[in-house]
Image: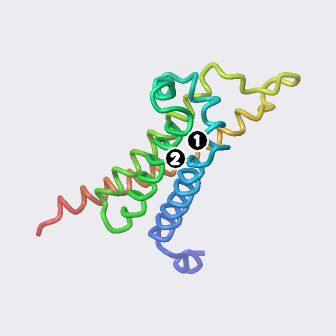
Amino acid sequence: MLRILDRFPSQALGFAALRWSMVFIFAMFGIAKFATYEAEGVAQIGMNYPLFAWMYPLIGVQGTSNVIGSIELATGALIAIGAWSHRAGLVGGLMGVFTFLVTLSFSLGAPLWEEEYGFPFMGSFAQFLFKDAVLLAACLTLALHAAHMLRTRSASPT
């Protein structure tokens, strides 16, 4: 059994796969925020959420979505740069954690269960949000990995 396990690639492959999948997700979601259909969809949630509601009267539906998209693109870029810079990876990972904590907080007080059936039958809003739990865990893993690498480097003699 151990001989088979010895043939598995290192954990570095797993971290790389996690990193680049998160870069892809942040790039696709970030780009989408610049489209009208996505801006209007985000506004349905964001206009009633205190963290974003103040932006709509100031910069409008598309402007608010553009800000959110820019933050998502910056997060993905920092996670990507984290392949070479642990400091950038830490910041990007923490930005991702914050992003998904915010989106998961939308579920507080929201109708999550299918009205006719109740728990555990999720409504479309819950299906939209609950995937973010694993994305949060992915960003947390990347942030912790970067922090560990920074700590290891600063502890090693030069």
Q: Residue at x 56, y 80 (%)?
A: 3
Q: Residue at x 17, y 59 (%)?
A: 155
From the image, tell me which residue sits under label 2: 137
122 relative to 88 in the view: left or right: right
Which quadrant holds residue 7? Answer: bottom right
Residue 27, placed above or below residue 10:
above
User: In the rendering, at what x and y percent does residue 17 appear?
Assistant: 53, 66
Q: Residue at x 45, y 43 (%)?
A: 97
Q: Nearer the viewer, residue 28 or 9?
A: 28
Q: Neighbour class for label 2 at 10 Å: few (<14), some, many (≥20)?
A: some
User: As shown in the figure, which amino acid type bears the numbered disc 2?
Assistant: Ala
Q: CA distance from mark 2 to mark 1?
A: 6 Å
Element type at marker 1?
Answer: helix
Colour scheme employed for the rendering of this structure: rainbow
Which quadrant holds residue 132? Answer: top right
User: As shown in the figure, which amino acid type bears the numbered disc 1?
Assistant: Ala
User: In the rendering, at what x and y percent does residue 143 appear?
Assistant: 39, 51
From the image, tell me which residue sits under label 1: 133
